[in-house]
């Protein structure tokens, strides 16, 4: 009997689908035409998953995988690629690896970890086209991005003038024009200090951002409120001020407090959980931060873990990379007119180093003290804390206290002795891992068809061989199914897939363009009419619905 | 295919179309504020408002020539047949190379890299003969840089080194860097100080507040002296003898650089293609970076071709390296000097070549041209060239930005979408390359079947 390749029966695996309350039950997952269904015909192809672990495909809520900053990093580090080549196969393209792999290698390597969706966390609108072009060459995974608006001059002008409604309309316009899935703030207010005041940086969230007569905290609060009221599927995604500085706990708490009454996502919170005094040694501030998050349901976060080894600092927070630069390390700064900064610098985390050990430990502490896996999600802020290729090892660290203890023996002892980590013996369960790497990010992003395996879900499915060594297990799924199509079988690529582009389209008054246009003609260097990303770039895409579109219209509307 | 016009309009009223905010791809400025008046009956652009002399010539001289779409050995053939032949050549070659790409949109560039991945060929762009050294320097030291709008809004010190934009990029000064008023530069040129550093007086000199004449081939020494002074080190007392620039001039320039609010160093091929090459670019990039200890400072190569920056980007995102990439082992490798086209051809390594929107037969060194003549060449160009006339397979393609859409990257990495003015009877380079790619895939599958 001929098999119908559009139908699959993944038979007899242990299914981890926390969004639907399924925790390791043995059952079949049925697939037709790219979706999970409740019935398939006799002709459906069967994949035998007996004894294996079945999960929805992973969803990365915060990484840097495409666009100018990533490409600068690729160009900057040939040494990285040369050591880690990525040969093609009969069905896949070749490329190079390293901390910032080429586009094709990025897509395939995400797939080989069982990830099927990823969001780039920082895209200046002017570079949106570039990002989408790279996405077309980033195979297998579905992808989208957050657009950088947190240092946008025009929006700051509106805030200065107290034009709240226009501010909201303009944010909606920008998200739509850039084809973004969310709004990103990075070190709000810092661009003006960096570009306009000879490389200074914001140090106090309450100081005045000349010439806008407002403070970083006021700006951040205004964005949080507007994004929430616009009902964007994902709340304002915030890289707080003072990243990486000892004592930044207070800044992070202030920022979260400014979000009261609204949804907000605090990005890579590990980098913002440092106690101690400014300029002195970092101490762990994980408890203060996670206690606040545990008790405030309006906050979601991704941890931004650190793993020892090669990384790359890559951020719209240009002053940060300048601060990290030691001796004459190669360094990239790239200013984008009116809207963003950017810094890129190769960086290596060393287990012998006090600060790096502290960062590694704080990331783990935050997870081990978290009370709600649905709001505290997995990330390394790839490639900032570590490459996404370290995820399996980090997952093992969360799941295996023996492994953790072993590793703690080899890190900087001075640092580890002041940490909470040695006292924490919690181990994450497979179900909790499925939440922090799949179900929770999908939910926080408003992706109703991802992160779960219920009927109607996208058939993005990973099948792992159950292995006590969780690093081995998560490093090499036996099968990866994308949009109902087997891409990896028995650890080998059997097919290629382009993946879908995900973005959102908040409603806005088109008249806002008349406000933006004059600013544009004065201060930008391209024409307003050439700024918006036109539909020809979208190819296979999907619009993520707004929060109020699903019938529950209450929140945020007045 | 070109018959887009309505027939009745032809009688008395001219069939005119206005294209606003079109983009000129003639040089790396990629000005996107063109207002084109198109006579659709004549297939001509009759007016190009806002264009400079070069841009005007680019638009107004463009017509649809009566020329075959495809030729094999000078004989007109159907497009399909030429694509078959091109695919066969690339499939059978042991060391096929592809070169050019900087006058094609990114969409075509992407397919060109894909072809080389498939046939395990070698891909290289014109970057290897212009700002390749800057790419190499970038790998060593990085770069502090900015988009041109940031220069317009903030730069109060603008320095050009080894370039003559008044002739090569006529609107660089007027649209982006010197004359325009910006957010923090309310009076335009009056609020900026402009320095030109070059070996001779050029038509760009009148723009400058100060011209500094450096001895030919002494750029590196001058840059290194500036770096030393910025870092507070002492320099050789005979610096003037070495570089032609006095100590007082250097000191004054260093103070100016350290004390501006936002400084920018633009550099051209006068720096990258003279003695020192990537050492020169590296020294300049390092100088700009060093200056960030004092103030905000950026640097930017002034790129020539309309989409050479796109080529750098596409080749980098697909392979990890900006130019000179070889796929022979089934994955990309980078080695300028080995995988750069001039060198490959001069050594006689290549046994087939695809030349895209470039004319190496007219501008490569003699040895390279001689070896190019010995191997089958596939050419894609919007006009007949020495290379296309000598090619075994020659495609005449539509002109990007005038007859085709697509994406180009300005010299500061800003991507811009093209707005074509009128149709062309010729296929786009993307269409031809996609046709070749599809055929190559089929040849490979068949090859495997036979082998099995
Ligand atoms: S400056 Fe360059 S891009 Fe601008 S109009 Fe002139 S030739 Fe065209």
Image (spheres, rainbow, N blue to C red):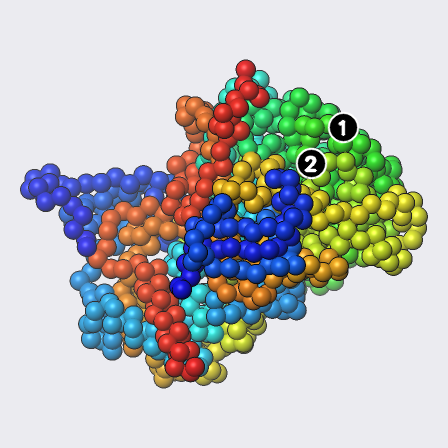
Find residue A384 and report its horizontal and vertical position in percent.
69, 50
The one of B392 and B83 positioned closer to us in this rendering = B83
- SS for tag 1? helix
What is the total number of numbered labels drawn onto the structure image? 2
Which residue is located at x 44 percent, y 33 percent?
Answer: A521
Can residue A321 be spotted in the picture?
A: no
Q: Chain of mark 2?
A: A
Q: CA distance from mark 1 to mark 2?
A: 11 Å
The one of B409 and B56 positioned closer to us in this rendering = B409
Relative to A389, is B176 above or below?
A: above
Left or right of B229? Residue A537 is left
Left or right of A24? Residue A446 is left
Can residue A298 be spotted in the picture?
A: yes
Q: Earlier in the sequence, mark 1 or mark 2?
A: 1
Residue beneath label 1, please? Answer: A295
Quarter containing the C terminus of chain B = bottom left
The one of B190 and A369 positioned closer to us in this rendering = A369
- SS for tag 2? loop
Left or right of A398? Residue B344 is left
The one of A193 and B82 positioned closer to us in this rendering = B82
Is circle 1 on the same chain as circle 2? yes
Q: Which mark is residue B99?
A: none
Residue beneath label 2, please? Answer: A375
Q: Residues within 10 Å of mark 2 (few under 14, many from 20)?
A: many
Find residue B251 and report its horizontal and vertical position in percent.
70, 50
Relative to A197, is B237 above or below?
A: below
Q: Is mark 1 in CB contact (under 8 Å) with mark 2?
A: no
Find residue B354 and report its horizontal and vertical position in percent.
38, 72
Which residue is located at x 37 percent, y 67 percent?
Answer: B437
């Amino acid at each position: 009997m001929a098999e119908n390749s559009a139908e699959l029966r993944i038979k007899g695996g242990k299914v981890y689908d926390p969004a639907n309350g399924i925790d390791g039950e043995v059952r079949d997952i049925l697939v037709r035409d790219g979706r999970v269904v409740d019935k398939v015909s006799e002709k459906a192809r069967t994949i035998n998953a007996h004894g294996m672990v079945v999960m929805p495909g992973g969803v990365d809520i915060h990484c840097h995988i495409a666009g100018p900053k990533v490409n600068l990093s690729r160009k900057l580090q040939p040494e990285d690629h040369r050591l880690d080549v990525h040969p093609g196969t009969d069905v896949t393209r070749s490329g190079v690896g390293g901390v910032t792999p080429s586009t094709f290698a990025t897509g395939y390597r995400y797939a080989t970890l069982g990830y099927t969706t990823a969001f780039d966390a920082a895209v200046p609108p002017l570079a949106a086209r570039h990002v989408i072009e790279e996405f077309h060459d980033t195979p297998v995974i579905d992808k989208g991005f957050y657009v950088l608006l947190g240092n946008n001059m025009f929006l700051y002008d509106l805030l200065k003038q107290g034009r709240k409604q226009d501010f909201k309309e303009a944010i909606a316009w920008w998200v739509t024009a850039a084809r973004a899935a969310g709004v990103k703030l990075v070190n709000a207010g810092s661009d003006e200090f960096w570009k306009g005041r000879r490389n200074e940086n914001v140090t106090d969230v309450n100081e005045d951002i000349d010439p806008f007569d407002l403070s970083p905290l006021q700006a951040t609060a205004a964005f949080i409120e507007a994004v929430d009221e616009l009902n964007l599927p994902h709340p304002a995604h915030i890289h707080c001020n003072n990243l990486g500085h000892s004592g930044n706990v207070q800044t992070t708490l202030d920022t979260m407090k400014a979000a009261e009454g609204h949804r907000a996502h605090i990005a890579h919170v590990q980098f913002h959980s440092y106690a101690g005094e400014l300029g002195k040694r970092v101490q762990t501030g994980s408890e203060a931060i996670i206690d606040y998050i545990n008790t405030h349901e309006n906050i979601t976060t991704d941890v931004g873990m650190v793993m020892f080894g090669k990384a790359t600092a890559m951020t719209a927070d240009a002053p940060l990379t300048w601060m990290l630069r030691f001796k004459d390390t190669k360094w990239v700064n790239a200013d984008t007119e009116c809207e963003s900064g950017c810094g890129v610098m190769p960086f290596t985390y060393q287990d012998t180093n006090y600060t790096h050990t502290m960062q590694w430990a704080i990331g783990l502490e935050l997870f081990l003290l978290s009370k709600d896996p649905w709001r505290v999600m997995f990330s390394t802020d790839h490639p900032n804390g570590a490459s996404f290729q370290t995820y399996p090892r980090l997952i093992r660290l969360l799941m295996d206290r023996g492994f953790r203890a072993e590793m703690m023996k080899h890190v900087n002892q001075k640092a580890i002795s002041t940490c909470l980590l040695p006292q924490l013996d919690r181990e994450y369960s497979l179900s909790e891992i499925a939440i922090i790497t799949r179900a929770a990010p999908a939910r926080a992003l408003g992706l109703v068809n991802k992160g779960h395996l219920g009927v109607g879900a996208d058939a993005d499915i990973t099948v792992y061989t159950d292995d006590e060594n969780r690093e081995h297990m998560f490093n090499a799924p036996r099968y990866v199914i994308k949009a109902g199509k087997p891409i990896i079988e028995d650890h080998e690529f059997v097919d290629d897939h382009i993946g879908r582009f995900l973005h959102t389209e908040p409603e806005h008054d088109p008249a806002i363009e008349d406000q933006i246009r004059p600013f544009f003609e004065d201060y930008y260097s391209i024409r307003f009419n050439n700024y918006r990303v036109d539909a020809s770039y979208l190819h296979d895409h999907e619009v993520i619905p707004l929060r109020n579109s699903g019938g529950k219209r209450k929140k945020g509307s007045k | 295919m070109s018959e887009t016009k309505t027939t009745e309009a032809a009688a008395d009223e001219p069939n005119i179309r206005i294209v606003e905010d079109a983009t000129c791809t003639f040089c790396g400025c990629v000005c996107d504020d063109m207002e084109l008046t198109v006579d659709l009956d004549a297939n001509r652009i009759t007016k190009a408002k806002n264009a400079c002399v070069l841009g005007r010539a680019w638009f107004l001289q463009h017509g649809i020539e009566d020329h075959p779409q495809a030729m094999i050995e000078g004989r007109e053939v159907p497009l399909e047949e030429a694509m078959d032949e091109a695919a066969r050549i690339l499939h059978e070659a042991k060391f096929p190379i592809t070169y050019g790409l900087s006058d094609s949109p990114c969409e075509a560039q992407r397919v060109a890299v894909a072809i080389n991945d498939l046939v395990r060929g070698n891909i290289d762009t014109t970057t290897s003969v212009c700002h390749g050294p800057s790419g190499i320097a970038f790998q060593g030291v990085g770069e502090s840089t900015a988009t041109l709008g940031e220069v317009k809004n903030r730069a109060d010190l603008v320095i050009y080194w080894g370039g003559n934009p008044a002739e090569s990029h006529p609107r660089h000064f007027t649209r982006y860097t010197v004359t325009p008023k910006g957010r923090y530069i309310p009076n335009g040129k009056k609020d900026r100080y402009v320095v030109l550093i070059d070996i001779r007086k050029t038509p760009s000199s009148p723009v400058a507040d100060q011209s500094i004449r450096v001895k030919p081939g002494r750029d590196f020494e001058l840059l290194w002296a500036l770096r030393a002074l910025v870092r507070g080190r002492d320099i050789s007392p005979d610096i003037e003898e070495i570089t032609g620039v006095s100590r007082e001039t250097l000191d004054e320039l260093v103070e100016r650089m350290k004390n501006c609010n936002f400084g920018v160093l633009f550099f051209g091929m006068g720096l990258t293609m003279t003695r020192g090459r990537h050492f020169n670019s590296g020294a300049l990039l390092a100088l700009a970076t060093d200056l960030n200890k004092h103030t905000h400072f950026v640097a930017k190569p002034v790129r020539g071709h309309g989409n050479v920056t796109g080529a750098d980007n596409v080749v980098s995102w697909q392979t990890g390296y900006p130019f000179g990439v070889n796929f022979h082992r089934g994955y990309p490798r980078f080695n300028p000097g080995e995988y750069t086209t001039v060198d490959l051809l001069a050594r006689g390594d290549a046994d087939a070549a695809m030349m895209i929107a470039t004319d190496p037969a007219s501008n490569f060194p003699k040895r390279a041209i001689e070896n190019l003549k010995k191997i089958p060449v596939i050419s894609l160009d919007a006009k007949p060239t020495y290379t296309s006339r000598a090619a075994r397979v020659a495609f005449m393609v539509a002109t990007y930005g005038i007859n085709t859409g697509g994406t180009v990257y300005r010299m500061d990495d800003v991507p811009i979408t093209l707005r074509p003015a009128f149709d062309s009877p010729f296929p786009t380079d993307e269409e031809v390359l996609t046709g070749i790619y599809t055929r190559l895939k089929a040849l490979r599958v068949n090859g495997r079947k036979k082998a099995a």
